[in-house]
Amino acid sequence: MRENNWKERGRVNASKRSKDPDMRVTVAGVEFASPVIAASGTFGYGVEFEDIVSLERIGGFVTKGLSREPMAGNPAPRIIETSAGMMNAIGLQNMGVRAFIAEKLPKLRKVKGAVIIANVFGFTIEDCLEVIQALNDAPGIAMYELNASCPNTSHGGMVFGTDPPQLWELVARCKAVARRPLMVKLSPNVTDIGLMARVAADGGADSVSLVNTFVSLAIDVETRLPRIANVTGGLSGPAIKPIAVRMVHEVSKNVTIPIVGMGGIVRAEDAVEFMMAGATAVQVGTASYADPRAVENIANALKRWCSSHEIVQVSSLTGTALL
Ligand SMILES: Cc1cc2nc3c(=O)[nH]c(=O)nc-3n(C[C@H](O)[C@H](O)[C@H](O)COP(=O)(O)O)c2cc1C
């Protein structure tokens, strides 16, 4: 019975079959030409990739995290390769929201079809509000992604996204000022990701994205020193994919707002897996380090996958895993 169900939702009979699958998805009222989006921190401010990737062919991209003031980031080494992944402690280096608006956004807005999601973070709620308010007046941005994995310095440095009351307050206050849809990027470093998604939704989030990186540690056994200067770093890449897929599934059982899934996607089938687990769209991060064209290649491969599986609308894949 359940098997027939996904076949009905995903397939169409021969008479209705068209050559090109419909790859459009809608997240919080924003339409994307493809569900494959470039993840924050791995795609610069978008313009750096303009000559490498055709920005109108991918779903869109998320900017590097933007803060109120420019940030220099952490000392090196801040990126290392691990088994099937990488660890980073870039320290949220960025040019600051005002420089982004003045120097990068005007060029980006000229790129036809590029859906721009601005990633926002701060170390206090007021910082986040200031970044959102600055972006509100800047044209050409489709949506905000609020990074909830930052420490709240007004509350002893506890990460917003690991404490339900702090997450709720962050989301509710950001939502109150945001003049564009607000997607909240959840921290995976929690026991109950479903609860955190519910808190974000209760606070007014229009969508949730997950996962950010997992706190991790690597030690050089010869020097006995941490391999990353910051000591700990965030683990990403294929190593985290099964955990991320499990988390997307848990979140899908807890909220009705759209979910954007990520963590270790390197090929079309990975994107399909996240969608079947409950994601409406996906993001690709670490894969862009191995191949700067990864996002576009995965978007194209996903379209071919849909064609070869007689999927007429990619959006019909969401939540169809037989779990
Ligand atoms: C080098 C690097 C920098 C990142 N910077 C940010 C950032 O500024 N803001 C953010 O929300 N996520 C950031 N992330 C997390 C990614 O957007 C993504 O959530 C995570 O890497 C999991 O996806 P992946 O396995 O496809 O890379 C960064 C990841 C990497 C590898």
Image (cartoon, grey):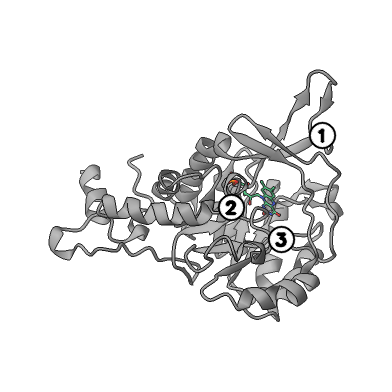
Q: Find residue 263 and report its image quarter.
A: top right
Relative to residue 155, is residue 242 depicted above or below? above
Q: Mark 3 or 2, which is nearer the eye?
A: 2
**Disc 3: which residue:** 170
Q: Residue at x 77, y 47 (%)?
A: 90
Circles 1 and 3: CB atoms closer than 8 Å: no
Residue 318 visible in the displayed image: no
From the viewer's perspective, is 305 left or right of 176?
Answer: left
Residue 184, percent from left and from top: 62, 58
Q: Is residue 153 left or right of residue 182?
A: right
Ligand 1 within 8 angstroms of badge 2 C-beta: no
Q: Amino acid at mark 2?
A: Pro
Whole-angstrom CA distance, mark 2 to mark 1, is 28 Å
- Alpha-carbon neighbours of circle 1 within 10 Å: few (<14), some, or many (≥20)? some
Residue 277 is situated, as x and y percent measured from the top left of the image, at: 42, 46
Q: Residues within 10 Å of mark 3 (few under 14, many from 20)?
A: many
Q: Is residue 177 above or below residue 7?
A: below
Q: CA distance from mark 3 to mark 2?
A: 33 Å
Closer to the camera in the image, 85 or 249: 85
User: The residue under label 1 is which amino acid type?
Assistant: Val
Residue position for label 2: 292
The residue type indicated by label 3 comes to Leu
The spot of residue 255 in percent (x, y) is 49, 55
Between tags 1 and 3, which lies in front?
1
Packing grade of label 2 (10 A; few <14, some 14-19, many >=20) is some
Q: Position of residue 143 (x, y in %)?
A: 59, 69
Who comes first in sequence, dot 1 or dot 3?
A: 3
Q: Are marks 2 and 1 in contact (CB under 8 Å)?
A: no
Q: Which residue is mark 1?
A: 231
Quadrant into which the N terminus falls: top left
292 sits to left or right of 227: left
